[in-house]
Image: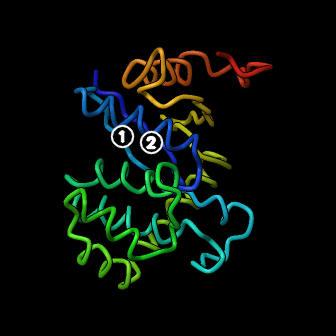
Amino acid sequence: MNRAFAVTFDYRCPFARNAHEHVLDGLAGGASWDVRFVPFSLSAAKDPTWDRGHDSGLLAMELAIAVRDTQADRFPDAHRALFAVRHDHGDNLRDVEVLRAALDAVGVDTTAALAEVENGLPLKTVRSEHDTATSEHTVWGVPTFITGDQAAFVRLMERPAEAEVGGAAVVDRILDQLTGWPELNEFKHTALQK
């Protein structure tokens, strides 16, 4: 069964990193999904200025969209690498050279991606996809999984390597819940589980 869904991201969010690693692992393991990776600026959700000086994650999202839309075969590795910049290495998502090094290391034609960013199309795409997620699905955070007319913010506490259930199995559980029981609006543990 080929399942189609979208999932939002902002590279600043550790929970988005966790969820996206599960999605990427599922895809790498052969999951038959049609996934759309949707940029969603946590800064613009509060103050839509769409300015890199205001939004510390915007440049990384623009580069991601440039890669997603012009070098699609490199996107999974680029996506992991951009999350790693912030969450594994503690580096600055505004630093062009840090981003360049991360993308170069996974085989992205970073010069071409940066040229795309400079022509402005990735910013228009980021903004448009963010606005569409907000207007059509009332998205307010990341990661939000979207399928059909259903959308749900999901907070996974563990990365795939640390999780008892991970990759495709955990994503399929999320999608089953989203499409199979939309009446359940909120389910949250009262304390962190070990």
Q: Position of residue 127 (x, y in %)?
A: 53, 68
Q: Position of residue 176 (x, y in %)?
A: 49, 18
Amino acid type of the residue tagged 1 in the rendering: Val
| 14 lies left or right of 188 | left
Q: Position of residue 185 (x, y in %)?
A: 72, 25
How many C-alpha atoms fall within 10 Å of the one at disc 2: few (<14), some, or many (≥20)? some
| 150 lies left or right of 123 | right
Tell me where residue 191 sits by quadrant.
Answer: top right
- Residue extending farthest to the right is 190
Q: What residue is pinned by disc 2?
A: 6
How many C-alpha atoms fall within 10 Å of the one at disc 1: few (<14), some, or many (≥20)? some
Question: Under tag 1, what secondary structure?
Answer: strand
Between 84 and 175, the one nearer to me in the picture: 84
Q: What residue is pinned by disc 1?
A: 35
**156 w.r.t. 64: above or below:** above
- Image quadrant in which the N terminus is located: top left
How far apart marks 1 and 2 lie (CA) works out to: 5 Å
Mark toward the start of the polypeptide (1 vs 2)? 2
Q: Are marks 1 and 2 in contact (CB under 8 Å)?
A: yes
**45 w.r.t. 181: above or below:** below
| 63 lies left or right of 191 | left
Residue at left offset 68%, top offset 49%? 140
Residue at left offset 41%, top offset 31%? 22
Amino acid type of the residue tagged 2 in the rendering: Ala
Residue at left offset 43%, top offset 27%? 160
Q: Position of residue 45 (x, y in %)?
A: 69, 60
- Image quadrant in which the C terminus is located: top right
